[in-house]
Amino acid sequence: MSAPPDVFVIAGEESGDQLGMKLMGALRSLRPDATIRGVGGPAMTGQGLESLFPQSDIAVMGFLPVIARLPTLLRRIRETAEAIIARPPDVLVLIDSPDFTHRVAKRVRARLPDLPVVDYVSPTVWAWRPGRARAMRAYTDHVLALLPFEPAAHERLGGPACTYVGHPLVERYAELRPGLEEAARRESGTPTVLVLPGSRRSEIERLMPVFGEVVARVSTQTPVDFVLPAVSHLRGQIEQAVAGWPVKPSILLGEAEKWAAFRRARAALAASGTVTLELALSQVPMAVAYRVSRLEEAIVRALATVSTAVLPNLILGETAIPQYIQDDCTPDRLVPALLDLIGDTPVRSAQLDALRRVDTLMRLDAGETPSLRAARIVLDHIR
């Protein structure tokens, strides 16, 4: 047997911490003698990682918060790179947070040119700043992609070697998919419709008035049980917004209630984002809406290189799920779209066919999980 592998992992935010925790478990299942060190959050430290510093020091999003924390971020970049250089591992794994992790990798590559670097989660080079893909080749040896179209995107853009390892959601099929009774509930009785206005305060502010009007109008045309799974930190804002709605949805809290609602839901009115992928894997047809400020809209139009903001559409390579963005994000457009998905219509059938294809494209081989596939590639780079 080869020497015990020494793996250095950097995860810069909560989602990366969850990926890192699962990767640590998979690495140890393959190599129980592995040493794993680096930077992580509560999930990774719960698995025994001694983080160089609290993950909260670098878990910053948004332009202004980054500027306010810039001295701390720069210091942590330097300290992380110095720790790696002082005691070189066998492989360096970056997990998401490219504004932090890639800066560390550049410093390390300059001093340790032979150290393998694996990037777990591809930056969105297929949507923004495509030149990043080619630039990554200078300090990244392999990208582990969460979405099945990303390897082709990196090849097209001249990026590093890239392998689809699977999205963490594919490990949660049991929570996402309805049982026999739940599937029957989707097809009979009063339909359950999900209202999903997003997980950021700005999304709630811009979408809740529109969604409230859609809920009210749909309720006048067909009986519907509207439910709104709320993230805990936005509960107060959501409850305040819903208080003014003519028809009020049931507000659900916690993941267990959320997934139970997904399993019985017949359709969804959703903000663009990761939730559209959750709905796709749950086989719930959706009407997708989004609004940003006019300044953000101008920036997006100038820089975006894709024509859709809906992840399932990107996976399929076609606009199978309609999106109602900016001026199209109105009750007049969304009400008929949602009614088509609630009823037994050709529109609903076509979208269900598309969601089944998304499921096929994202599935992994039997017995393999994203974290296990990722761990194998990480260890291969040591060999």
Image (cartoon, rainbow, N blue to C red):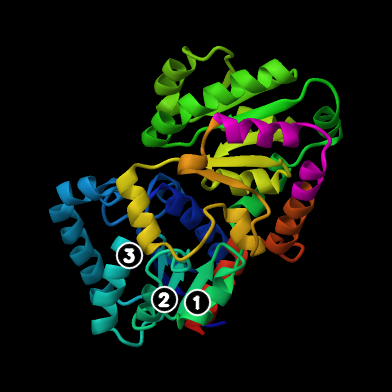
Q: CA distance from mark 3 to mark 1?
A: 19 Å
Which residue is the site of mark 2? 133
**Residue toward you, 116 or 261:** 261
**From where the camera sits, is residue 161 visible?**
no
- Range covered by the magenta-colored residues: 331-351
Contact between marks 1 and 2 (CB within 8 A): the answer is yes
Q: CA distance from mark 1 to mark 2?
A: 6 Å
Which residue is the site of mark 1? 154
**Residue toward you, 86 or 208:** 208
Query: Which secondary structure, mark 1?
Result: helix
Relative to 293, residue 249 above or below: above
Residue shown at 65%/35% (left/top)? 268
Mark carried by residue 145: none
**From where the camera sits, is residue 304 visible?**
yes
Q: How far across and down, in percent of the image, does residue 263 sit?
A: 73, 35
Which residue is the site of mark 3? 101
Residue shown at 27%/69% (left/top)? 104
| Amino acid at dot 1 | His
Q: How far across and down, in percent of the image, does residue 113 sit?
A: 31, 87
Q: How far across and down, in percent of the image, does residue 299 sit?
A: 33, 56
Relative to 39, residue 103 above or below: below
Q: How far across and down, in percent of the image, does residue 46 sit?
A: 44, 46
Query: Which secondary structure, mark 3?
Result: helix
